Image (cartoon, rainbow, N blue to C red):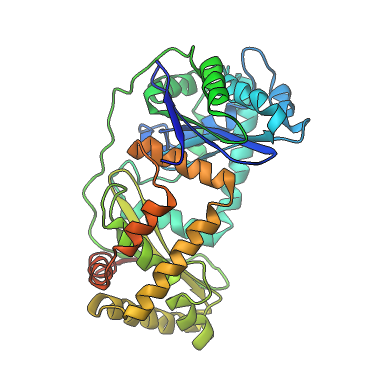
Amino acid sequence: MEFNTYTLLNGIRCIHKQVKSAVVHCALTINTGTRDELPGEFGMAHLVEHTIFKGTKRRKAWQVNCRLENMGGELNAYTTKEETVVHATTLRGDYTKAVELLADIVFESTFPEHEIEKEKNVIFDEINLYKDSPTDRIYDEFEDMVFAGSSLGHNILGNKATLRKLHSADIKQFIERTYTTDQMVFSIIGNISENAFHNVADKYFGSITPSTRNFSRSTATAPANFIHTVKRNTHQVHSIIGNRAYDLKDDRRVPLLLLVNMLGGPSANSLLNVLLREKNALSYSVEASYTPFTDSGIASIYFSCEKDNESKCTELIRRQLEEVSEHNVSPRRLSIAKRQFLGQLAISAENNEGYMLGAAKSYLVFGDVDGFQTAKEKIDAVTADDIRQVAMDTFTDMSALIYK
């Protein structure tokens, strides 16, 4: 493994990579997301992410915000369905200050009631902004429908009615239940020696009281396929089709990742971009995506277009999906797809922060991080028949959500 690893006595796992850089990135990745919320808590994980910056036992909110920013550093956080990540970036000489601050806000936040009420209004504005963005909203609404009845079946922001009922005591109870040390990874990447990595992990995280998660996640049976149309009064039609897909530990996720990238990845020569945009000038935006979770996943294709072009776009996409489901891709197409995907991986690894956060999640889930050579071997092993099989599994009998 390209990373140094270290486990503290309290169960917090630590991962480090030394690189030549004047900048250090560090993060605490917590295996807690919106799927860990109980009924009546929807939006809680995201609320915690906002309010951990609002004061600790030794700092006021403004002191938290200024601690790194005054030195040109950055402090931020994000929430997903399965993780909450608090991360910081500083110059190399200031990295210990960043690690100390991460430990302080995650383990010593006080959640003052007046700060929580103010931050709720910020989140309400975020919800309003989200509702004004059909491109974002359709993904979340589709995911909610595909995972209906499951802990994955509600969006990250929550809703205003539920959030209004949540208070400091509720937040502290949620953290006590879900922020356990056996579900955390501390990660750091920069020009820091392995010995310094051990020392900083020990100093700021080693004294945290150990705790163990006492609940498990489960995903409900998939609902029946659906085709659902919603009137949104948008200038364009927004459409998304897809299905549940393989989980993080399913080996078939590798050919599916490759297929999704071929169909609608970021490159201009993706099959659907060429078909809808370059050849037929029907859509400015078409993309395919696949998000695996620990016990399930979702794969989808999204496009927007003029309302008169919806049926044409849908038919072209249907034909392309039939083609990859019924026939093996050519050796040349497969070779190009593999080289393209590996190139994208290599380029993304040049972003040290993104590379660190991805490695932390991998270490959290798998207890290991694949190096580039291992990833290359997995991609090289994918066959044309593998691609056709995952296409048949994933992109037939799909559900659809349409905004008109």
- Which of 241 and 99 lies nearest the eye of the viewer? 99
Instruction: State the image quarter where residue 342 is shown.
Output: bottom left
Q: How many marks?
A: 0
**Which residue is located at x 54 percent, y 23 percent?**
195
Establish if 282 lies above or below 26.
below
Instruction: State the image quarter where residue 27 is shown.
Output: top right
Q: Position of residue 66 (x, y in %)?
A: 74, 28
**Which residue is located at x 25 percent, y 72 percent?**
388
- 12 vs 75, left or right, is left
**Which residue is located at x 61 percent, y 51 percent?**
129
Q: Position of residue 325 (x, y in %)?
A: 26, 75
Establish if 35 lies above or below 329.
above
- Which of 258 and 331 lies nearest the eye of the viewer? 331
- 115 vs 141, left or right, is right
Q: Residue furthest bottom?
A: 279
Q: Position of residue 25 (x, y in %)?
A: 61, 37
Q: Position of residue 190 (x, y in %)?
A: 61, 37
Q: Residue furthest right?
A: 70
- 382 vs 336, left or right, is left
Is residue 43 in view? no
Is residue 120 in view? yes
Q: Quadrant of the N terminus?
A: top left
